[in-house]
Image (tube, rainbow, N blue to C red):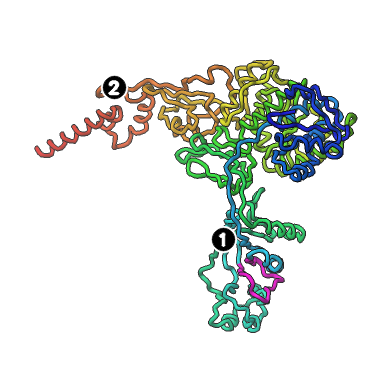
């Protein structure tokens, strides 16, 4: 059978999976019943080899992927092989007999073409390694690694240590001030704290023999607690000059490709430290594992550039006034920092979690691995195929490609097909690079396509780093769908690495109500537009339509409220708004608001010199959200000289009230405050000429 140009090979795995050939053929538009094998990886390998070189091949088995790849290689095949797991994810389940719609959905998903490649980021590491930490451990690991890597050592504590007899690599001492950078480009700064400079020291031992307090040992560092300042060591060192108690220049810095930090407390305290920085602490086993990784970090490497950033719509700051800092607060790698009125991302530090895109209210930051349109196409294809094969109440189980994928496979292996365990027939697993990248556009988009629920399966590390951000997005989305009358729990964050616990929770999850008619629109890269399409579809089919939905603080929709008694219509808020939600009245003294554009970043409130603005989160679903609404208007003020309107009465009255008592504006000065710009200049010039004439006459 051909599936989008691919030949599909199905196997019941020795008849442990119930496969409905006719229903699958219908769901996949095969035109005729599918051929079902039972021992494709054993007695029926000939059926696999027979289709090689004809087309690309999709094999519904992942366990024997290495075997099928070897067979294709031995045959000299140029066919592109792809594999999909329908055994542990569908067929091996208590509801294996009901899993045909899910199997069809998984096969349809696997048949989609590969997504467009994204830009890549390069690293280069030549193996220049700095080992930081106590002398004894640092020197021991330096001796073991010196033949594999270009080693340097920075001793932060000399207690119990002894330097090697042969100077095979640089050894420094000092206290770390900072370590920054990434694989191939670490900048390390430290301060030379000990009087003995190990770079200059020849290790002649004269200082050790000369010290009356035995404050110097074979680490060639002075123990300040024992030293009585006789300075006999300085005299013994002589012209070498390695010992200096009065050293002025203490700052040191070097560049390295790799850092092995053996300190009790790591210098880089991030949930996800940069690649190339390993901090195993004191545990010998962890140190050995870290050392084993270092040799694999030499060479040239690439990784995807996981994000895209549009500075034009970023709500971080305007004119040095703070707005949204969600992405900076969420990033666990320290990759995002403020950059003037915008932000900057160091792509070498970014690990692709996507949390920044999830919490970005404007869509300035987007996750592109995969791109949202690609993820939307996968969701749409899966759910349409599932529904077309008779499936109901689909629950999408998003998971990552590592721990969570293994957990789902383990769940299937625990099952007794047709009797107990496995995934329910309605739970469809969908693998993504990171579940933290799934924001409200994806969550609500899935419901619009007909999903009953969305579950994010996260491991403990993901939950620790991004759990609050994911849960907040789910609360916003759940508030919206619940208010529209869709009963049940639609979104859930499941944090576990235990197969038995996951099994209990997915079977306990009851279906929630969703749309009767699936949406046909496509998810787009513009977050706000996608959200608008999804919400409009859900609202159109809502069991309980609403014109307005109250949301909690932090939601990316809402009102801007203006205190008309204090607002002077200076329009500073209009200039600060990154989303064009606030607009002026062009030729009239008006402040207008387009609610659909507002991202609730707070820049307008922080910019307002009169503190006249406040925010009120809500989702407005009526036509009013898309039209300009007047927040404040004022009576025009006419110039007292020419009668032309040049401002508003409230602004001029406030200005006169504040400046009226100032000597500079006494007499004619006060009158000028009530003139337009042209008349003010004319009045000043006439007054100046009159004063000059009077001066000459006098």
Q: Is residue 278 left or right of residue 526?
A: right
Identify the residue at the far left of this view. Answer: 697
Residue 330: percent from left, percent from top: 62, 41
| Mark 2 residue crowding within 10 angstroms, few (<14) / some (14–19) / many (20+) | some
Q: Is residue 124 left or right of residue 415?
A: left
Instruction: Report the front residue among 632 and 396.
Output: 396
The residue stretch that appears in magenta:
151-173
Residue 22: percent from left, percent from top: 80, 22
Q: Which residue is mark 2?
A: 644
Q: Quadrant of the N terminus?
A: top right
- Locate residue 687: give its quadrant: top left
Q: Is residue 67 above or below residue 165?
A: above
Q: Which residue is mark 1?
A: 255
Residue 238: percent from left, percent from top: 55, 83
Residue 632 seen in render: yes
Q: Is residue 539 left or right of residue 315?
A: right
Instruction: Report the front residue among 331 and 676.
Output: 331
Q: Who's the residue at 76% across and 59% down the image?
A: 283
Q: Is residue 50 above or below residue 537?
A: below
Magenta stretch: includes residue 221: no
Instruction: Report the front residue among 697 and 101.
Output: 101
Magenta stretch: includes residue 162: yes
């Amino acid at each position: 059978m051909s599936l989008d140009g691919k030949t599909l090979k199905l196997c019941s795995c020795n008849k442990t999976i119930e496969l409905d050939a006719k229903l699958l053929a219908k769901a996949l538009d095969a035109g005729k019943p599918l051929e079902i094998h039972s021992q494709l990886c054993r007695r029926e390998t000939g059926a696999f080899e027979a289709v090689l070189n004809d087309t690309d091949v999709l094999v519904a088995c992942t366990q024997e992927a290495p075997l099928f790849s070897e067979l294709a290689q031995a045959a000299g095949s140029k066919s592109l092989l792809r594999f999909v797991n329908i055994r542990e994810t569908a067929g091996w389940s208590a509801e294996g007999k009901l899993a045909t719609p899910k199997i069809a959905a998984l096969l349809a998903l696997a048949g989609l073409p590969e997504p467009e490649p994204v830009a890549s980021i390069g690293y280069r590491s030549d193996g220049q390694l700095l080992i930081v930490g106590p002398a004894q451990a640092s020197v021991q690991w330096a001796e073991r690694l010196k033949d594999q890597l270009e080693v340097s050592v920075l001793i932060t504590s000399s207690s119990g240590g002894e330097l090697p007899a042969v100077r095979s690599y640089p050894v420094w001492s000092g206290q770390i001030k900072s370590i920054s950078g990434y694989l191939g480009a670490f900048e390390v700064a430290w301060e030379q704290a000990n009087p003995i400079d190990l770079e200059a020291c020849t290790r002649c031992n004269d200082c050790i023999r000369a010290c009356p307090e035995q404050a110097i040992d074979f680490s060639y560092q002075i123990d300040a607690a024992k030293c009585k300042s006789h300075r006999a060591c300085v005299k013994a060192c002589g012209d070498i000059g390695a010992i200096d108690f009065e050293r002025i220049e203490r700052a040191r810095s070097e560049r390295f490709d790799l850092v092995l930090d053996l300190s009790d407390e790591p210098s880089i305290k991030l949930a996800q430290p940069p690649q190339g920085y390993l901090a195993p602490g004191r545990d010998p086993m962890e140190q050995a594992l870290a050392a084993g990784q270092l040799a694999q970090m030499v060479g040239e490497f690439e990784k995807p550039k996981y994000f895209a950033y549009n500075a034009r719509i970023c709500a971080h700051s305007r004119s040095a006034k703070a707005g949204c800092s969600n992405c900076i607060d969420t990033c666990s790698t320290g990759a995002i920092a403020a950059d003037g009125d915008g932000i900057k991302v160091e792509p070498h530090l970014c690990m692709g979690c996507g949390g920044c895109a999830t919490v970005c209210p404007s869509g300035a930051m987007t996750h592109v691995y995969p791109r949202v349109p690609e993820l939307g196409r996968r969701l749409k294809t899966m759910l349409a195929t599932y529904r077309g094969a008779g499936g109901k109440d689909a629950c999408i189980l998003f998971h990552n490609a590592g721990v969570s994928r293994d957990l789902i496979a383990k769940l299937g292996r625990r099952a007794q097909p047709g009797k107990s365990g496995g995934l329910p027939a309605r739970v469809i697993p969908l693998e993504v690079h990171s579940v933290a990248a799934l924001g409200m556009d994806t969550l609500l988009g899935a419901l619009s396509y007909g999903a009953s629920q969305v579950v994010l399966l996260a491991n403990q590390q993901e939950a620790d780093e991004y759990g609050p951000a994911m849960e907040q997005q789910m609360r916003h989305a759940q508030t919206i769908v619940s208010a529209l009358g869709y009963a049940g729990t639609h979104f859930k964050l499941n944090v576990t690495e235990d197969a038995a616990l996951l099994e209990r929770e997915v079977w306990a999850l009851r279906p929630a109500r969703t749309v009767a008619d699936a949406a046909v629109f496509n998810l787009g890269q513009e977050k706000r537009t996608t959200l608008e399409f999804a919400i409009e579809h859900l609202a159109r089919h809502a069991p309980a339509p609403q014109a307005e939905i109250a949301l909690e603080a932090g939601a990316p929709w809402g009102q801007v409220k203006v205190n008309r008694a204090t607002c002077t219509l200076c329009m500073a808020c209009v200039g600060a708004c990154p989303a064009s939600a606030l607009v002026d009245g062009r030729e009239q003294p008006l402040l207008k608001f387009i609610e659909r554009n507002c991202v609730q970043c707070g820049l307008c409130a922080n910019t307002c010199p009169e503190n006249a603005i406040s925010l009120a989160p809500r989702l407005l679903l009526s036509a009013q959200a898309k039209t300009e609404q007047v927040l404040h208007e004022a009576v025009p003020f006419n110039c007292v000289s020419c009668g032309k309107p040049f401002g508003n009465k409230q602004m001029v009255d406030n200005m006169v009230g504040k400046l009226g008592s100032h000597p500079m504006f006494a007499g004619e000065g006060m009158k000028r405050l009530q003139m337009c710009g042209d008349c003010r200049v004319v009045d000043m010039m006439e007054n100046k000429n009159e004063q000059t004439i009077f001066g000459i006459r006098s």
